[in-house]
Image: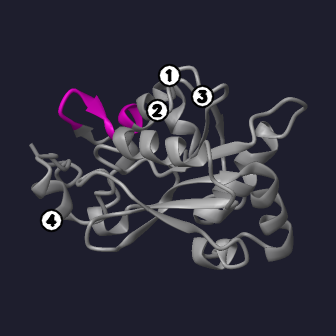
Amino acid sequence: MLAGGRASRLGGAVKPLLRHRESTLLGTALAAVRGAERRVVAGPSSLAPAVDGAELVQEDPPFGGPVAGLAAALPLLDRPGAPDWVVVLAADLVAPAPAVHTLLEVASSAVEASLLAVDASGRAQQLLGVHRRAALVEALTALGDPDGASVRALLRDLPPRLVTVPGGTTDDVDAPADALRHGIDLPGPRGAD
């Protein structure tokens, strides 16, 4: 679970803690992988009260980007008997559970090392995928320094198979217009009533 980031386009709001319907975005993401053997959240220590039994790790350096978050989280998943597949999921998605279900269903018979969710328009969501753990570790090692690296660069040598997922399940909250479209209230400026 990737929950780091500055949310600069949202005025610095803590995106994973934004409320959508009856849950935070982080809570929604954690619920999407509730059946996972182990759940790891890469994000700031301020998220500790909200991780719902998952392990929390911070990327190094802080705010180093999603690849730095993966580099921090993957060692916690590397142990004897660990599942072959790892779900990589951003904590700013509004309804990822059906996409995760679809990706895991496809993964059960996939020969590829990497699967990414793609919406009906053909846009791939780089932070909603299922990847073979060993291949992801190899890709991270080959990439070198994860600080500021792009997910596209990380997955370049895998390469990902694009899997069409149900509509709306790749929607994320990156800008105020996204929040408005999904009925998410953004906190006002500090000091506002």
Q: Which residue is mark 4?
A: 177
Q: Which mark is residue 36?
A: 3
Q: Which residue is mark 2?
A: 30
Range drawn in magenta: 20-28
Q: Which residue is mark 1?
A: 52
Residue 192 at what x, y percent from top left?
13, 48
The secondary element bearing badge 2 is classed as helix
Numbered disc in front, either 1 or 2: 2
Where's the C terminus, which quadrant?
A: top left
Numbered disc in front, either 4 or 2: 2
Q: Which sits earlier in the primary sequence, circle 1 or circle 2?
A: 2
Question: As shown in the figure, which amino acid type bears the numbered disc 1?
Answer: Asp
Comparing 136 with 109, the one in front is: 109
Residue at image position (80%, 33%) is 82
Quote the CA–CA distance across marks 4 and 2: 24 Å
Q: Which sits earlier in the primary sequence, circle 3 or circle 4?
A: 3
Question: As shown in the figure, which amino acid type bears the numbered disc 4?
Answer: Ala
Look at the numbered discs 1 and 2 and tell me whether their residues touch, using CB distance below 8 Å: yes
The secondary element bearing badge 3 is classed as loop
Quote the CA–CA distance across marks 2 and 3: 10 Å
Q: Residues within 10 Å of mark 1 (few under 14, many from 20)?
A: some
Q: Which sits earlier in the primary sequence, circle 1 or circle 3?
A: 3
Question: As shown in the figure, which amino acid type bears the numbered disc 3?
Answer: Ala
Residue 119 at what x, y percent from top left?
31, 64
Quote the CA–CA distance across marks 3 and 4: 32 Å
Q: Is residue 78 left or right of residue 38?
A: right
Residue 69 at what x, y percent from top left?
64, 55
